[in-house]
Amino acid sequence: MRILTLNLRAGGGTRIPALVEALVARDADVLVLTEFRIGPSGTRLLDLLRQHRYEVHLHNDPPAGTNSAVIVSRLPLTSERSPHHRIVAAELHGIQLRGIYLPLNQAKVEFWEEHFGRVLGSLRDEPAILIGDFNTGAADERQSLVRFAAEDRYEAMFRQG
């Protein structure tokens, strides 16, 4: 099974045909796309992917123009309940799959406290893949002295497994 993630950057816009071509060329079974947006661009993206056998489309109906995540798949998925449109939940062959698009800056810290922390806790004892755009990082991943918002939570997530 091949899973691929890509940040569409602002929904993809005029780049959607080229993005779809690049995604299809990778021949992944499941795609987790971040900065997905409901509206004409999102509809076009999903329609083009459907033409390449990506029949399953899971998202949480994000508000129009809002960055979110979508899972598209050639394989059957079981949709799971998710606490927020920035987290798309599915099960695939006994593995919990979460497509993630976390907000920027201080909003990410609040989101982590209100929503994402519970998701992490619920998956602690299950096989799981969390994939997407966390919009943060760990101190050892860069040379800069600038700190990421929620960096401490991101690092704790890895320490907890």
Image (cartoon, helix red, strand yellow):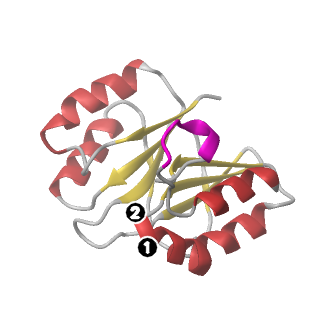
Q: Residue furthest bottom?
A: 114
Q: Position of residue 101 (x, y in %)?
A: 46, 57
Residue linked to disc 1: 107
Disc 1 to disc 2: CB gap under 8 Å: yes
> Is the residue marked by circle 2 packed among few (<14), some (14-19), or many (20+) residues within 10 Å?
some
- Looking at the picture, tell me which residue is in the foreground, 154 or 139: 139
Going by the numbered disc 1, the residue's amino acid type is Ala
The residue at 25%/50% (across/down) is 11
Say the numbered circle drawn on residue 104: 2
Q: Position of residue 112 (x, y in %)?
A: 58, 71
Decide whether residue 71 is among the magenta residues. Answer: no
Going by the numbered disc 2, the residue's amino acid type is Leu
Q: What range is drawn magenta here?
A: 139-145
**Is residue 76 found left or right of 121 in the rendered image?**
left
The residue at 74%/58% (across/down) is 156
The residue at 61%/46% (across/down) is 139
The residue at 52%/56% (across/down) is 100
Q: Secondary structure at mark 2?
A: loop
